[in-house]
Amino acid sequence: MQSHRAVLLNAAMTATMHVRTAADTVVSALPLPHVYGTVVMNSALLYGGTLVLIERFSEAEMLAAIQTYRATLLDGVPTMYMYLLNYPELDTYDLSSLTRCAVGGQTMPVAKMQEVEQRFGVPLIELWGMTEIAGLGTTHPFYGINRHGSIGMALPYTECRIADSGDATLTLGVDEVGELMVRGPHVMQGYYGNEAATRATIEPDGWLHTGDVARMDKDGYIFIVDRKKDMIITGGYNIYPAEIEQVVAAHPAVAMVAVGSVPDELRGELARAYVVLKSNAHVSEAEVIAFCREKLANYKLPRSVKFVADLPKTSTGKIMRRQLKTLDG
């Protein structure tokens, strides 16, 4: 349950951080029932911008819309950008009107963010949010430091902290890993008809459990480590899929990657990388694992690599890690 104040304030503060104004033309294929799509729509409507909606994402339609309408801003989830990067005709479109792009919905490997900036010629601003806060909780200021790998810092009027995973009342220090918690005027009123779930999610003092494992650096920039529920436990070691994905995504042959788990009698479960290759690219399983070995501790290495044509995604374009097992058949 959300208040009107929460929804409108979120759009206002997002517009403030990204400098979304009446001068902007925004292209988006984000579903409008989703909070990211809602914030993009509301910020355009509230402040006089032009919103170009793509009914269903396709590389050609999105690129054509940017070129035709001289868009200044593109919003999307990581998979949309990865599809665009792998699109053979990308360089034939005129994208010179863009002044910035924004990405959210899921963490994006730094290597792919850098590639977007290189190919599109504009900054890529990462953001983070969730349904329970009516949209964004953090992002980077357009006129500030854009620290890749980070989801930025708290929106105005919003507080963020990293809490001890075992005791939410304890706030951790710089770069210590715990649960990201949020407090502010856009925290939900609760789950309709489910008081127990509401109490489990919102602390009596207003702090909301996000379920995201994160750390905060000395400058207040927040880095998502992974979702709590996606953690893989191998022989007693905690492995976060996003860390492996960051490394695999940096391989020049990789277009997209997601990491899931496979059962193992000895160690409980092992990490497996599901890889979509770039057009006309070739690499072996052994080469991918060797590439990871240079950057990851031995226990974090993916123990197998499966090459696939595509990855399972939600209607918003998020990769569904728990559906990766369906690719093993």
Image (cartoon, grey):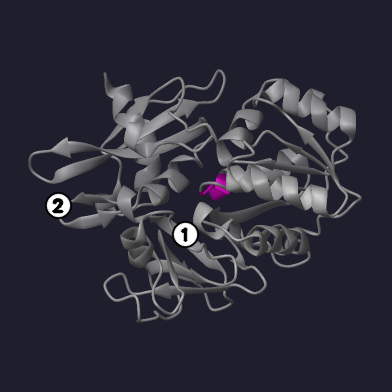
Q: Is 88 included in the stretch rendered in magenta?
A: no
* Image position of 254 (left or right of 324): right
Q: Nearer the viewer, residue 85 or 324?
A: 324
* Image position of 246 (left or right of 74): left
Pinpoint residue 282: horizontal percent, then vertical percent.
47, 22
For the point 60% across and 61% down, which residue is it? 3
On screen, 233 above or below 17? Answer: above
On screen, 145 above or below 31? Answer: below
**What residue did someone put label 2 on?**
235
Q: Residues within 10 Å of mark 2 (few under 14, many from 20)?
A: few
Q: Residue furthest right?
A: 23
**Magenta region:** 107-111
Can you tell which of label 2 and label 1 is closer to the viewer?
1
Say what secondary structure mark 2 lies in. Answer: loop
Pinpoint residue 63: horizontal percent, then vertical percent.
76, 28
For the point 31% across and 51% down, which residue is it? 229
The quarter of the picture where the C terminus appears is top left
For the point 73% across and 38% down, which residue is it? 119
Count of numbered tags: 2
Q: Residue furthest front?
A: 193
**What residue did someone put label 1 on?**
224
Residue 35 in sight here: yes
Say what secondary structure mark 1 lies in. Answer: strand
Magenta stretch: dominant secondary structure: loop
